[in-house]
Image (cartoon, rainbow, N blue to C red):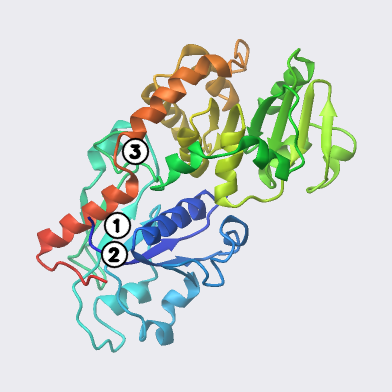
Amino acid sequence: MAALRSWDIFCRVIDNLGDIGVCWRLSAELASRGQRVRLWVDDPSPLSSMAPGALEGRWPGVRVLPWSRSADPSVLTGLEPADVWVEGFGCEPEPAFVAHRFGGMGRSWAPPPPVWINLEYLSAERFAERCHGLPSPLGQGPAKGHVRWFFYPGLTAATGGLLRETDLAARRAAFDRAAWLARWNIRLAGEQVVSMFCYEPAGLGPWMRERSQDARPTLLLVPSGRASAAVRSHLGGSARATEGSPGRHTEGSLSIVFLPPLTQPDFDHLLWACDANFVRGEDSLVRALWAGKPFVWQIYPQSDQAHQGKLAAMLDAWAAPASWREFHRAWNGLTDGNGARWEPDRWAPAVESVRSGLEAQPDLCQRLCAFVDRAFAASGSGGKQS
């Protein structure tokens, strides 16, 4: 059983909401396990739809605070020091926040220093295992001499694991697909049901055209936002017009339902309700892995092309069959798409094998709390436990 501690988690919303998605899931799951969390975020607005009630303080164990207040002297002087600091994806806390904790601004307490974690991006590349858990001594500033630790999420026992709620498997087993679809006025009639959560993949238009001409009908469910805009750009008439257009839009064998912004639990429900899923970035990739349905991942493209190696390493880790691998490469613009086959039924065994293997491992929160406990034990301080 991990010690109960207080946590400061820092998040800057850079792009596409994956960073706040990960940081919120981490905050909420730590709180569900008895930890006390302050989430400092520069743009908390996405939480209005992701986690209704979070901004109003109605989420037990989690307090959401504006990033700007982390540098406010009037706030810092009354701030109870946390045991653990977690930087989401290397977003460093404000210098004033660090200075206050490590010797300044008239503090009257002398707590042990926090265990300071840099929560990195998910990767299946070999460096994630090599670098996970390594210390990075700070060489300057008020925290000089203190250690910041690298914590890498990953797919193996030598990494930090993946975020997973303790009740996830039970909720998935109890999920009523028909009832959830009925909430959106959807009644199935033998369609292949696919979710689309993407950026703007080059293969989207060709895939939609193929589905519209296929003998088997496809129902495409598209959450509001960037994915919705991308899908609409390949449609004609009123379906292209505006975000939020109601109803079902049909082109040949392809029917499309545009959904409103979803809470994080409902995003899980979307993935569970579908026969196959398209996801993007990091947070939705992890949810697709837990859903256990055939999926296609659009990796965030990088100008230095580093995403190519990252995608290849992930496909290797999944032992992806040839057609799943080739479809991923085409979807991510790494090939011209010739020969890429949409064969989700063939990919299903590999996906289920990956999920079952990951579910047998401790989750990220377990590993993170254990890591923090070991760090405090090694320092001899034990930390200020709640």
Badge 1 amino acid: Ile
Tell me the residue at 83%/21% (across/down).
Answer: 252
- Which residue is tagged 3? 154
Picture layout, residue 79 above or below residue 177: below
Q: CA distance from mark 1 to mark 2?
A: 8 Å
Badge 2 amino acid: Val
- Which residue is tagged 1? 117
- Answer with the quarter of the image where residue 95 lies: bottom left
Q: CA distance from mark 3 to mark 1?
A: 16 Å
| SS state under label 3 | loop
User: Quick one: label 3 or label 1, which is nearer the N terminus?
Assistant: 1
Q: Nearer the viewer, residue 284 or 41?
A: 284
Q: In which quadrant is the C terminus drawn?
A: bottom left
User: Quick one: label 1 or label 2, which is nearer the N terminus?
Assistant: 2
Badge 3 amino acid: Gly
User: Quick one: label 3 or label 2, which is nearer the N terminus?
Assistant: 2
Front label number (1 vs 2)? 2
Pointer 3 with pointer 1, Cβ within 8 A:
no
| SS state under label 1 | strand
Q: Position of residue 63 (x, y in %)?
A: 45, 70
- Which residue is tagged 2? 84
Q: Position of residue 59 (x, y in %)?
A: 49, 66
Could one spot residue 304 in this view of the protein? no
User: Most extreme residue toward the top, as rendered?
Assistant: 339
Pointer 1 with pointer 2, Cβ within 8 A:
yes
Q: Nearer the viewer, residue 50 or 232?
A: 50
Decide: few, some or many residues near mark 1? Use Cα within 10 Å; few <14, some 14-19, many ≥20.
many
Q: CA distance from mark 3 to mark 2?
A: 21 Å
Decide: few, some or many residues near mark 3? Use Cα within 10 Å; few <14, some 14-19, many ≥20.
many
| SS state under label 2 | strand
Tell me the residue at 44%/20% (across/down).
Answer: 350
Q: In which quadrant is the N terminus drawn?
A: bottom left
